Amino acid sequence: MKVCKSLVIRGHVQGVGFRAAMMRKAQALNITGWVRNLPGGDVEAVVEGPPEAVEAIIAWSRRGPPGAGVVAVEVREAKGGYTRFDVRW
């Protein structure tokens, strides 16, 4: 069973390697989906995989990589069907 969640990560999350670090974490957890920067300074991601792996990457996103200053993570249900994890531009 897979679940799919949409995340919006708010705070100091651009210019700190957030997307690249999330991609590495997603690959380690066998998560599919994508991550991208938003024009307002936030990061958006869609993560799909086993419930425990999705919960693990959500927990990771609340901290982010060194240098990030996450202040909030909005989590919503999303539509899945991804086969790999990508960084979107």
Image (cartoon, rainbow, N blue to C red):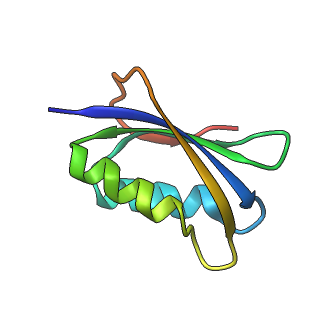
Residue 77 sits in which quadrant?
top left
Farthest-out residue, right: 40
* Residue found at x 22% / y 52%: 52
Q: Position of residue 23 (x, y in %)?
A: 48, 55
Asked if residue 85 is positioned above or below residue 19 in the image, the reply reads: above
Say left or right for 18 vs 58. right
Farthest-out residue, left: 1
Q: Position of residue 35 (x, y in %)?
A: 57, 43
* Residue found at x 85% / y 42%: 40
Q: Position of residue 29 (x, y in %)?
A: 29, 56
The quadrant of the rendering that contains the C terminus is: top right
The quadrant of the rendering that contains the N terminus is: top left
Most foreground residue, 29 or 8 = 8
Q: Position of residue 30 (x, y in %)?
A: 27, 50
Say left or right for 10 vs 7. right
Asked if residue 72 is positioned above or below residue 81 in the image, the reply reads: below
* Residue found at x 23% / y 44%: 51
